[in-house]
Image (cartoon, helix red, strand yellow):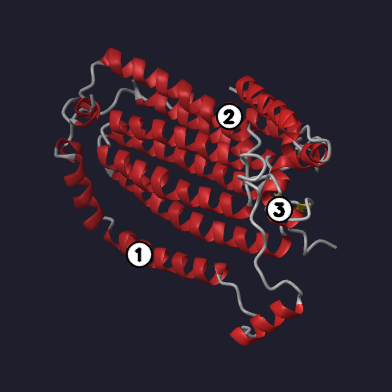
Amino acid sequence: MVHLFLANGGPGGTNLDPLYDEALFWILAVLAVSAALAMILVRHAVHSALMLAVVMLCLAIMYAMQGAPFLAFVQVIVYTGAVLMLFLFVVMLIGTNSSESLVETIRGQRLWAALAAIGLAVLLIVGIGHAAIGAPAPETSANSTDNLTGLARLIFTTYVFPFEVTSALLITAALGAMVLAHRERTTRKPTQREVLRAKIDSGQVQPEPPPGVYALHNAVDMPAMLPDGTLSDRSVSHAVVGRDVQLGRDPQGVVTVDLSTGERIDTERELEAGDRGTEESGA
Amino acid sequence: MSPASYVFLAVILFVIGAVGVLVRRNAILIFLSVELMLNSCNLAFVSFSRLRGNLDGQVVAFFVMVVAAAEVVVGLAILMAIYRARRSASVDDANLLKN
């Protein structure tokens, strides 16, 4: 299938059958527009980034359909592969649960944004509609050779100076990212002796207890049971507790209530059944 | 398909990206919307390249990709710096210059 797009023979840079061409365009256009709409409408940044990946892959196929196989592959490798992965890294660093509030901070902002968007769309579409864009140009000397050869010739002859300037731009960007992401150490680095002394002074020399994964329940959000039968809050990661609060679950509460009465096993089964129920309803 | 259809699709994607920039408050999502706008411009460049029958449009699209990569690197680094200082990625919280 791919060689159909990539062969660069016919007029307009593609030898796709016109019917396939049209069908593929409409499928990809609907997919790209709906993914773009989803991208600006979903709440979580991760979902947004994945939706943008869908749009970018659709555009890559469109580049290939229009006789630009080099750009199609650069789109997949550089944009979808590198840039979006960088986005996902930053989303993960900043925290996936920092989803924004949907409250308007500027009154009437969405209304005015919608009006401005409609205005921009009408302006551009009317302008382009008047521009009388005709059929694609017939095969010329520029695109008759292999796409890659022609592009290389252009980049290294006509556009060689901009091409060299982009290298300076990329080095500047890399340096800028290093400067901005670098955290200056404001205090002296503590020595090994000082770390040890602070640990002993804090009253807890041993590491934090691990969560009670196998002790009570098969989950890392279950706190460990200490030898005296109490539960240790320190055994559960704060991030896991935060997620439980988000999902409205309270595993600690369930277990503490039931520990003394000996009904722990039963409630645990109920809890697991409830979990399974929510998973099924979620799926 | 005629190049005009691709250009109209590029316009629609550009407008969607512009709405994203205007409406969303999370700086990462604003960045993603800017990327969408850059991508739609690339689609228009490739379409014009096919329309004109020469490869200059594709070269410009290639340069747009390079500049976008550099922009993303610096932008995300700034975002990280702001997040480290303000513990928030919302553009409303970066208000040190206010008042």
Q: Is residue A9 above or below residue B32?
A: above
Q: Identify the image quadrant of residue B29.
A: top right
Disc nearest the viewer among 1 and 3: 3
Disc nearest the viewer among 2 and 1: 2
CA separation in Å, label 2 and label 1? 35 Å
Q: Is residue B81 above or below residue A272?
A: below
Residue beneath the point at 23% across and 24% down: A1
Read off the residue under disc 2: A38
| Of the image marks 2 and 1, the number of the one nearer the N terminus | 2
Instruction: Provide the secondary structure element on which disc 3 rests.
Output: helix
Q: Is residue A59 left or right of residue B29?
A: left
Kindly identify which numbered label has been placed on residue A238.
3
Read off the residue under disc 1: A167
Q: Position of residue B26 (x, y in %)?
A: 67, 46
Q: Position of residue B71 (x, y in %)?
A: 49, 56
| Of the image marks 1 and 3, the number of the one nearer the N terminus | 1
Asked if both marks, 2 and 1, belong to the same chain, the answer given is yes
CA separation in Å, label 2 and label 3? 31 Å
Q: Is residue A24 above or below residue B76?
A: above
Compare residues A81 and A206 and report the one nearer the observer.
A206
Q: Amino acid at mark 3?
A: His
Q: Position of residue A282 (x, y in %)?
A: 62, 23
CA separation in Å, label 1 and label 3? 44 Å
Asked if both marks, 1 and 3, belong to the same chain, the answer given is yes
